[in-house]
Image (cartoon, rainbow, N blue to C red):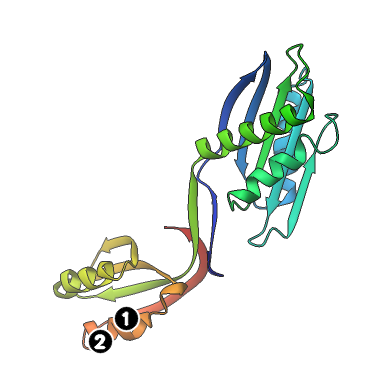
Amino acid sequence: MNDFEYLTIKKPSESLLIIKKSKFISNVFPIKNKEEAEQYLEVLRKKYWDATHNVYAYTIGKNDEVQKFSDDGEPSGTAGKPVLETIKSKGIKNVLVVITRYFGGTLLGAGGLIRAYSESASLGLDKAGIIKVVKCNIYKVIIDYGLLGSVEWEIRKRNIVIKNISYTEDVLLEVCVPISTNIDFPKLILNLTDGNAKINLIKCCYMSI
């Protein structure tokens, strides 16, 4: 990964792992800030009010600027920390993982707990789907209909994403250009159209592409 991209999850997920009759329910959520994490935690604590433990870990920020975990009553270092390390080992950012445990009557020991929570976290993250988020410049491009075919082909050939095409009096393209490509996109479009195009930089943001 470079400075302009990171991994996160595609969608929330729920999965179940049973080890020696103990149930480990993994709930995974994409989050943007601590407030979102706390809201999800509150909902799950109410949903699983009768659980033995509600262990969690989350990271926020492209460089894991915010990290937090809780063992929620499990022996120190056997639950929340393994969940956090599983998240970090996969390189995933902006994610909350909550592992709800219903004790099945058999003690797993420290090593068994670490393996169980790590496996449950990994299962939930994989089910949520791991995607790449890339820092992009978003451009609006207006061209004549006669130029669309050649311009679209040249854009796609460079792995630049056309997010939307609108057909009005002219053709309006919304284009996502990853910063890591180092392409001077306005210059490219003007060269392709002999200057017969209107180009505006709309915003710079992180997007899954």
Left or right: residue 42 compared with residue 144? right
Q: Which mark is residue 191?
A: 2
Disc 2 packing (10 Å; few <14; some 14–19; many ≥20): few
Give the amino acid type for the residue marked by disc 2 in the picture: Asn
Give the amino acid type for the residue marked by disc 1 in the picture: Lys
Residue identifier under label 1: 198
Q: Residue at x 38, y 80 (%)?
A: 183
Q: Position of residue 16 (x, y in %)?
A: 59, 23
Q: Look at the numbered discs 2 and 1 and tell me whether their residues touch, using CB distance below 8 Å.
A: no
Image vertical order of residue 137 relative to residue 87, above or below: below
Q: Residue at x 29, y 81 (%)?
A: 189
Q: Which mark is residue 71?
A: none
Image vertical order of residue 129 relative to residue 184, above or below: above
Q: Secondary structure at mark 1?
A: strand
Disc 1 packing (10 Å; few <14; some 14–19; many ≥20): some
Q: Residue at x 17, y 73 (%)?
A: 150
Residue 36, can we see it? no
